[in-house]
Structure formats: structure tokens, C-alpha cells
Amino acid sequence: MPIPSLELQIQTLPDNPGVYQYYDKDGKILYVGKAKNLKKRVSSYFNKIHDTAKTNVLVKKIITIKHIVVPTETDALLLENNLIKTLQPRYNVLLRDDKSYPWICIKKEPFSRIFLTRRMVKDGSEYFGPYTNFKMVHTILDLIKELYPLRTCNYDLSESNINSGKFKVCLEYHIGNCKGPCEGLEPLEEYQRQVNAIREILKGNFKESLKDFKKLMNNYAQNLQFEEAQKIKEKIEVLENYQSRSTIINPKITNIDVFSIVSDESAAYVNFLQISHGSIIRSHTLEMKKKLDESDEELLELAIVELRERFQLLSKEIIVPFELDLGENIKITVPQLGDKKQILDLSIRNAKFYRIEQLKQLQIVDPDRHVNRIMAQMQKDLRLPSEPRHIECFDNSNIQGTNPVAACVVFKDGKPSKKDYRHFNVKTVEGPDDFASMTEIVYRRYKRLLDENEPLPQLIIIDGGKGQLSAALKSIDELGLRGKIAIIGIAKRLEELFYPGDSIPLYLDKKSETLKVIQQLRNEAHRFGITFHRDKRSKAALNSSVESIPGIGEKTMLTLIQYFKSVKRLKLATEKEISDVIGASKAKKIVDFYKTN
């Protein structure tokens, strides 16, 4: 049976919420998506040209559309998540996180054992986690061990086994780490009371344990059992110390999940914090590889569904940085201030740090890939005909028209190439005329490169707006380089990018790496130009304040002025004081000069 046309397939789609699937000519799945209205959402793919090339390529490949209708949008979210994980379509977000993380298990058995495990067995045991930070798991287990003497053996401590004397106490009992339930030396009720206290600690509630320990300490002290009281006091200190490190917000905030997102051009990083009794009891960051320039809202929705399912989260309230639609059963909070805003900011900070870590690791492991990615991104963002592997940036420096200078800094593969930096003294311009200075400097720079057959840059950046750009273009036109080198101007205040012949500036995303590279170039040009300008101004000031002394060079005089702070002090200094700085022969010349003059 022939496949019906796409137009016919779209016309017959329902107006209900559901999940749609795109397939290519070979029946291979390309993309899975969710929609409030299947017909409207799928139609939107085919009635316009998309901003990203990837989406346009996807649309061209679609031959078959399948769909599944569901009662609500929440169900669509869950189904989309499951289908993406099962089918792994080429154009869907890639969730990079299939590690097996450890859990803390409270075993369902008489005299429950508490231990670390990677396997969840559905036998009625309780599991807390998963913990993404191993250090945190071991810290919690050490804390539990220090506070409560629990058994570590795996004996079947049924009542009949204990009564028949089947087991004997081990070394753990003799050194005080266990109270000997295997020989019936500790009643089950007492042991389970400790397990209940540990359960509360794992949920982030330290209040009950602290209350019990303080009560016990006071009882020991009243009965003059000061050694026992001191041991309990030490346990309270351990618990309080752990609590102070884990509690960062209002203890009234309980059973809340916090989600935040930080994204760049190619990936998004979603951080999740689980809060119970004012403590963070779990933190996790998920990396999501973008495929079709998805929005932060789409990515965060997908991540929340995935994380809630994976970590079995049942909280009724979640904190997020912007409004989302996750169904009626979940309360969405977008805090603007207070404790909840503080915890959201912490989550965002975690996501940012995770992203920086990943990028640093990528740079170390595969530096070429990192450079290639940035170059391709810059070409796309700045609409250039080729990758800007060689960029030059110009900046003018003058103060009230004195000592006009300019700087040219060079970046190769997105990194400063300091050996190629150049300073320029402005020669043909009188007074503070920045536009004329720019024309002169750009002409001199590229006339020289052409004369010496040196490679030309792919991109020139002019530090300034439309006026500076027009001034630089005069020289580019005069040298016949228009069309051979891309040139843009960057205005200082709003990070506006100006292109030749276009009065409307381009604004880049504040988070984009392209803008960061351009800002770094501009700042470097400014720094390099200002340093040269200051040196030149200092020399001019020195020459005007110091007479020319026969046999004494400029460097020597600069050293003396830096040491004596002024010419007046230098004149008053003794020959011995001067010779300590520059040597006896030069000191004699200076002293003789000031005596005769």
C-alpha cells in the first residue's frame, strides 16, 4: 500500500494532545515530539522555513507521520520521555546520563542492615538516593556508624535463630560497634527505634535525633555518668556539624524539588536539588545535547519528567526559574526573593559550574574539537563566508589629543597570538581625530601585509560604532580588499555589532561564546593600546621634567626618578645615595652636572 502524501497525513491528524513520530523513507525514526494540539503542532513544521539548518534538513527527510493520542498534556510529556529513551531518535535531545548511582538501603528484615548498593531489589526494602556524589554517601554512612551501633553481619536474625543460640557475638560487639542482637543482647524494639532515627536523618530531618541524644545526655549527667554523657555530647556535635553543612535554608521548606537550566549553543545542563526539612538531601546535574535548537522551556520540561521518574520523586511542589506546564497535580513556583529564590540561585550556580567543568575537560581531552566548535559557531553567528581563524581588532587611544596611538591585537583559532600584536604611532593626524586615526592605521596595517605577502585575516573588528567602521572601510576600499576580508564594528555600550552598509546593528545572545571571544578581543586591544599610550605619555612627561645630562641615557634617568620620586629629590641626593642606585661613574656625572648648573 503506497504511503499517503504528507499533506493528507497532516489533514487527518486530530486536534487532541498527544505524541507524534517522524519517520524517513527507510522507516527509520527521526524525531519524537509532544503537543497540546497534534494537528497544529505538526503543521507548523511544514508551513515555514525554520531558523536552523538542522530543522530544515529534518523536515525534508520526513515521509511518514505517526501519532498517539493521550488524555492530557502531562501524559504526553511522560510518553514522549519514554519513547525518546526507547527509540533514541536521531534528532531528539540526547540525555547524557546513564550511569548507575549508589543508593543507601534499609533492608526489610529483623534488625535491619543499612548499607550502600547499586542494585534495587523490590523486596519491600527502603532505598534512599541515588547519590551522585560518592563522598556524600560515605560521609552519611560514617555519620550513621558514629551515631548508632548497628550490626554489619548478614545473619538471618529471626527470633527462633536467636533463641536457639545459633550465632555468637563477633569483634564488632567487643569493640563497642554493635550491641549483640545475634545473642539477644539487644531487643528488637530498641534496635528498630535507632533505624527509625536513621530514616529521618536520610530524609534530612535531624531534629528528632538531636532531641533524643540531648535527653539521653542529660539523663547520664544527672546520674553522674559523665563519661557516657561526654560520648553522647560528641555524637551531638558530629550531628550538628553535619546538619550545619547540609542545612542552608529555612527548615520549614520541606519536600520540594528545585530545577534550573543553563544552556549554550550545543547543550543544556539541568541541575536538580531535592530539599527536605531545609536540607539538600540530593543534588544531580544532567547534560542534554541539543539537536534542533530547542528552547530552555522544552528542555527543562523534558528533564523534569525524566528526573522525577528516575529518582521516584513524589513532591507536589517544584521550584523553577520560569513558568512551565507540567499538569494540574504539580504546583509550579517561580520565586523572586526569599529562601526559595536563594535555593534556586544555588541550583543555577551548580549548573553553571558543571558546564564550565565539562568545557574544560573537553578542551584538555580534545582541544581541536573545542576550537572547531567555536570557529563554526562564530561563522554562523556573525554570518561570515568562512571560519574566522585569524581575527584582528583595532583600538585608538588618546587623552585630550596628546600622544595619539593605536593598537592591533591578533587572535588565531580563538586565542591571543601576542607575537603578532602591533602598536602604531599616529603620524598624519593632528589633534584628537579618532576617525582619521583609524583610517590611517588600518591603511598602514594592510598595506604592509599586502607588500610583504603576509596572510590576511578572515575578520577585522573595529572598536567603535558606525563612524569608526566607516573610517576603517575607506582604507579597505582604497586597498581593494572589500569583499576579501569581513569587517564589523562593535559599539562599547550595548555590544551592538555593525556591518558595512547596514544601519541596523546585530545583537548577539549575552551567553554566546561568539560574543565572549569578541569582548575578549576588544578588551585585549584596549589594554594593549592603553599600556603603550601610558608608556609614551610617561616618557614625554619625563623628557619635559629632566634636563639632558651628557653620558646619561633615558633608562638611567627613569630608574632614578622611580627611586627618588622627583627631580627635586634627585638634585638634593648625595653622590653616595645616587651611586647605590646606578653605580659610581654615572653618579659622579649627575652630581657634577647639577653643581655646574
Image (spheres, rainbow, N blue to C red):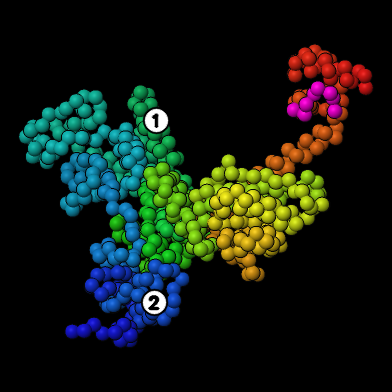
Residue that appears at 35% across and 23% down? 227
The answer to whether residue 140 of the structure is visible from this angle is no
Q: Mark 1: which amino acid?
A: Lys
Q: Which residue lies furthest to the right in this view?
A: 597
Residue carrying label 2 = 45
Q: Mark 2: which amino acid?
A: Tyr
Residue 536 image position (x, y, % from top left): 75, 39
Residue 125 image position (x, y, % from top left): 21, 49
Would you say 546 lies left or right of 380 here?
A: right
Which SS type dominates the magenta stretch?
loop
The alpha-carbon separation of the residues under discs 1 and 2 comes to: 67 Å
- Which quadrant holds residue 539? top right
Would you say 579 lies left or right of 517 here?
A: right
Q: In which quadrant of the rendered image does the N terminus lie?
A: bottom left
- Which quadrant holds residue 159? top left
Q: Viewer-proximal residue, 93 or 131?
A: 93
| CB-based contact (under 8 Å), mark 1 and mark 2 | no
Residue 157 image position (x, y, % from top left): 13, 39
Residue carrying label 1 = 233
The answer to whether residue 165 of the structure is visible from this angle is yes
Residue that appears at 85% across and 32% down? 545
Magenta-tinted stretch: 548-555
